Image (cartoon, helix red, strand yellow):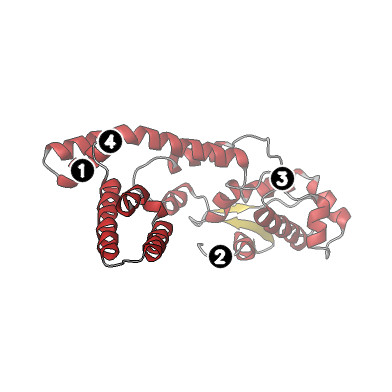
C-alpha cells in the first residue's frame, strides 16, 4: 500500500460485500463495519471517508464543523447523528482512528508495539501483515500521540540496550586485529581523531602554500591582501595563528 494517497487508502479499506460495508485488511481478513440505524450504507461510508481523510491530513480528530466544511454534500445534522452513535466509533476503530485521544492504548495496539519494536530483522511491513494490520491503520495509529510516543520510547530503549552489545563486539573485533575496529575503538575513547588529523594536515598544506607565495611578493600591501583573503576563506580550519606567524 506504499505510495497511496489517503483517499486511495480509504476507498480500499472500505468496500462493499453485497449489501454490507466491510474493512479489508492486508492479510485478506474481512471485518464488518457496523452501520447505525437510520443510515444508508453509502451515506455512512462517505462520512467515514470524510473523517478519515481529514484525520490523516490534519493530524487530529475533526469536529463536526470541520468535516462538514470539507464535505458539505452531507447535512451537518447527519454528521452529528453519526458522531453520536457507537457504531461510528467502532467503524473508526477498525481504521485505527480513536475519537478520544485520551482513550489509552488498545490491546491490539499494545501487541503491535511489542512486535514492531522487536529487533528481529524483519521489516515493519512483514510484521504488520503477520498481525493482520494494514499500513493505513498503522499510519492512523501514528497520528495518536500516546501510541507514537510509546512506540518511540520502545525504540529508544532498544537503542540503549544495543549500545553495550555493539561496544563488546567492537572490542572483540579489535582483539582479532581488525584495523577498522581498532581505529574506531581508539576514536570512541578519544585517543584517535581522524577529523582532527585531516584538519591538521590541511592546515599544514595551507601554511606551506601561503609561505611560498609570500616569498615572491615584495609589496607589503599585496602580502596583507593575500593573508586577509586566505584568512577569510579558511576561518573554519583554525589557521589564523599560523598565518600571523608567517606575516611577522
Q: Tell me which numbered mark, 2 or 1, is placed earlier along the sequence.
A: 2
Q: Secondary structure at mark 2?
A: loop
| Label 1 packing within 10 angstroms: few (<14), some (14-19), many (20+) | some
Q: What residue did someone put label 1 on?
A: 183
Q: Secondary structure at mark 4?
A: loop
Task: Answer whether labels 4 and 3 touch (C-beta < 8 Å).
Answer: no
Task: Tell me the distance, in whole angstroms, between the alpha carbons under discs 2 and 4.
Answer: 47 Å
Task: Answer whether labels 4 and 1 touch (C-beta < 8 Å).
Answer: no
Q: Tell me which numbered mark, 3 or 1, is placed earlier along the sequence.
A: 3
Q: Tell me which numbered mark, 4 or 3, is placed earlier along the sequence.
A: 3
Q: Position of residue 150 (x, y in %)?
A: 53, 36
Q: What residue did someone put label 4 on?
A: 190
Furthest residue toward front:
219
Q: What residue is rendered at 49% in x and 50% in y?
A: 132
Task: Tell me the distance, in whole angstroms, between the alpha carbons under discs 4 and 1.
Answer: 11 Å
* Circle 3 or circle 2, nearest the eye: 2
Q: Position of residue 3 (x, y in %)?
A: 52, 65
Q: What residue did someone put label 2 on?
A: 4
Q: What residue is rendered at 27% in x and 52% in y?
A: 198
Above or below residue 6? Residue 187 is above
Q: Secondary structure at mark 1?
A: helix
Above or below residue 12? Residue 94 is above
Q: Tell me which numbered mark, 4 or 1, is placed earlier along the sequence.
A: 1
Above or below residue 37? Residue 172 is above
Task: Tell me the distance, in whole angstroms, between the alpha carbons under discs 3 and 2.
Answer: 25 Å
* Circle 3 or circle 1, nearest the eye: 1
Nearest to the observer: residue 8 or residue 17: 8
| Label 4 packing within 10 angstroms: few (<14), some (14-19), many (20+) | few
For residue 89, the mark is 3
Task: Tell me the distance, in whole angstroms, between the alpha carbons under discs 3 and 1.
Answer: 58 Å
| Label 3 packing within 10 angstroms: few (<14), some (14-19), many (20+) | some
Amino acid at each position: 500500500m506504499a505510495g497511496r494517497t489517503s483517499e486511495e487508502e480509504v476507498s480500499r479499506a472500505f468496500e462493499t460485500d453485497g449489501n454490507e460495508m466491510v474493512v479489508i485488511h492486508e492479510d485478506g481478513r474481512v471485518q464488518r463495519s457496523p452501520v447505525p440505524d437510520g443510515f444508508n450504507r453509502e451515506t455512512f461510508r462517505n462520512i467515514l471517508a470524510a473523517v478519515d481523510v481529514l484525520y490523516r491530513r490534519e493530524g487530529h480528530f475533526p469536529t463536526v464543523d470541520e468535516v462538514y466544511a470539507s464535505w458539505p454534500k452531507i447535512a451537518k445534522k447527519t454528521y452529528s447523528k453519526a458522531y453520536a452513535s457507537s457504531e461510528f466509533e467502532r467503524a473508526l476503530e477498525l481504521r485505527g482512528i480513536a475519537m478520544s485521544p485520551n482513550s489509552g492504548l488498545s490491546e491490539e495496539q499494545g501487541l503491535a508495539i511489542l512486535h514492531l519494536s522487536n529487533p528481529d530483522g524483519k521489516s515493519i511491513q512483514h510484521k504488520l501483515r503477520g498481525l493482520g494490520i494494514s499500513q493505513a491503520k498503522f499510519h492512523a495509529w501514528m497520528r495518536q500521540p500516546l501510541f507514537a510516543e510509546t512506540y518511540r520510547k520502545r525504540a529508544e530503549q532498544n537503542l540503549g540496550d544495543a549500545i553495550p552489545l555493539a561496544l563488546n563486539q567492537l572490542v572483540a573485533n579489535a582483539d582479532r586485529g581488525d584495523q577498522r575496529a581498532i581505529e574506531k575503538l581508539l576514536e570512541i575513547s578519544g585517543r584517535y581523531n581522524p577529523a582532527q588529523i585531516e584538519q591538521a594536515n590541511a592546515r599544514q598544506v595551507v601554511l606551506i602554500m601561503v609561505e611560498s607565495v609570500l616569498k615572491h611578493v615584495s609589496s607589503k600591501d599585496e602580502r596583507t591582501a593575500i593573508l586577509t583573503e586566505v584568512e577569510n576563506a579558511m576561518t573554519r580550519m583554525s589557521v589564523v595563528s599560523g598565518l600571523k606567524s608567517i606575516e611577522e
